[in-house]
Amino acid sequence: MINVITFDLDDTLWAIAPVIEKANQRMLEWMNDHTPKFSQAYDHHGINQLRDEVIADNPHLQHDLSQIRVTLIRLGLSRCGYDTADTLAQQAFDVYFAGRNDVELFAGAQTQISSLKQKYQIGALTNGNADLAQVGIDHLFDFYFNSAQLGVSKPHPDFFARALTHTGLKAEAFIHIGDHPEHDIAGAQACGMRTIWMNPEDRPWPAGQPKACEEIQHLDQLGAAVENINGH
């Protein structure tokens, strides 16, 4: 019997690429006004290069996207000669983070989660750093874990094990819903959870990998997919 439904967030409940692009643009516009030497030195590509450098030099941060972002901004500001890089980096990050949480939910997201919440515990399991309160959907979730909190990222088994420990339930009581065949589907399958693949772009399933229990192209199909699994 299914008791818990867990969701990935980015590209499962909203499209993340346009959100990150918008957040970066807002940050660069703020920095153009407050730290113009940074915005002159680093465009979107330059920010990605700083990010790669930070991760390479600070492997302990690899699971903490927020700290990576603050560190790369601080690094760029320092290289541009700003003495108050720590304060400015946090201010710039706050602008970025507000944009990062300004998402457009996929059609049916709130309706489907609200409906499922009447029967199941609802959790979020994400490698990202979305803030459910800022997104405005924290009231729909009973628990939330991200990679920064746990120090590992999906598909690491410890990530899914944390959800089991938190609820006190076995994996057979879970359905995990996500867009990533490896991080979400394979990771959840490996610990014994049932799975639903969110595949809005109707991509082919990777050859040689066990398929999810159900596949949906839009969230309006979610309730039926959950009931199909629960019925079996």
Image (spheres, rainbow, N blue to C red):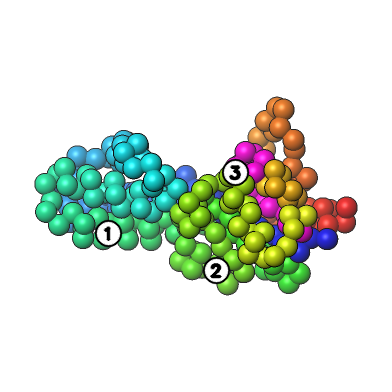
Q: Residue furthest right?
A: 232
Indicate the position of residue 163 as horizontal and vertical percent values.
Answer: 63, 59
Camera sees residue 21: no
Quarter of the image containing the N terminus?
bottom right
Q: Which residue is mark 3?
A: 155
**Residue sitting nearer the eye, 210 or 15:** 210
Q: Secondary structure at mark 2?
A: helix
State the residue position of label 2. 138
Q: Is residue 87 above or below residue 118?
A: above
Disc 3 residue type? Pro
Residue shown at the point (59%, 50%) measured from the top left: 158
Crowding around mark 1 (Cα neighbors within 10 Å: few <14, some 14 to 19, many 20+) is: some
At mark 3, the secondary structure is loop
Q: Residue at x 29, y 49 (%)?
A: 71
Rendered residue at 71%/44% (across/down): 189
Kind of residue indicated by mark 2? Asp
